[in-house]
Image (cartoon, rainbow, N blue to C red):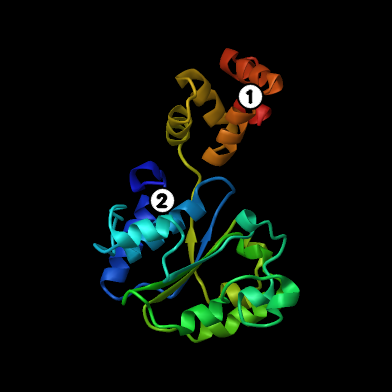
Amino acid sequence: MRFDELLGHGAHLHGLWRSAALGRLPHALLWRGCDGIGKFQALDLLARGLLCARGPGVPCDTCGPCKRVLARSHPDLLVVDPLEDGWEQIPVAAIVPRRAESEGWKGPSIGEFLLLRAHEGGWKVVLMRAAERMTESAQNALLKTLEEPTRSTLLALETSSPEGLRTTVRSRLIEVRCQTLAHSAVAEVLVRAGSTAAEAQALALLSRGSPGRALELFRAGTSAASDLLEAVESGRTSAAAAA
């Protein structure tokens, strides 16, 4: 996703890139907010902007580091994404090198990754999606990493269920609260995906500010969804009642 395609989180990103340029970026962040509002996509852009040859700032997406981040081949970026990899839980082996074979975890643990010197001489970045999926043992193991940060490293966690994280873990993270998007922004996402303007406006109302939820409704294309949209557009039911 390009920076100009990411709606709603630009202020957070600019502020963090500015902090990085001044040497004040916190080493551990927690991006929290509703499902489907682009939190993890924003973290991916944050990482690209830190690792970009022109960074920290808006990634150019044309330099070698940007291309390597996009291809998930950058040696200074580690992504833990249980949704992409089909993990119900994030095991302790993802955090520290322990029982990796029995847990089926592939690749380096976060602890091993952060101990290595940056290959390209800049930042080392860890992104974790759905951080609430960490097991209790994994969260306990993460505490030591959070307490002993290394220079020019960023550990950024994303969650829609912060209550699933231990208080001791959350207390060591700087929280970034991501808000739902304006209806006009959600409608813009839908139009880019091929929706008509009228349908986009109706789905934006139904989604309650979540472009991800709106896209699911649009792509489902069921008769029930169509009937519901027609009811909202005609005024026979309210968006709140339909949602």
Q: Is residue 40 visible to us here?
A: yes
Residue 85 location (% of width, % of height)? 63, 58
Residue 200 location (% of width, % of height)? 50, 25
Query: Residue at the location (45% across, 27% down)?
Result: 191
Q: Nearer the viewer, mark 2 or mark 1?
A: 1
**Which is more toward the observer, 20 or 1?**
1
Query: Mark 2 and 1 residues: CB-CB less than 8 Å, in contact?
Result: no
Residue 183 location (% of width, % of height)? 47, 33
Q: Is residue 141 above or below residue 202?
A: below
**Which is more toward the observer, 238 or 188?**
188
Q: Quadrant of the C terminus?
A: top right
Query: Residue at the location (41% across, 55% down)?
Result: 70
Residue 199 location (% of width, % of height)? 52, 21
Q: Secondary structure at mark 2?
A: loop
Query: Residue at the location (45% across, 21% down)?
Result: 197
The residue labelled by disc 1 is: 221
| 122 to the left or right of 158 | left
Q: Secondary structure at mark 1?
A: loop
Q: Is residue 128 above or below residue 181?
A: below
The residue labelled by disc 2 is: 9
Give amino acid for label 2.
Answer: His
Which badge, 2 or 1, is on the more N-terminal residue?
2
Query: Residue at the location (48% across, 20% down)?
Result: 196
Give amino acid for label 1.
Answer: Gly
Q: Quadrant of residue 21?
A: bottom left
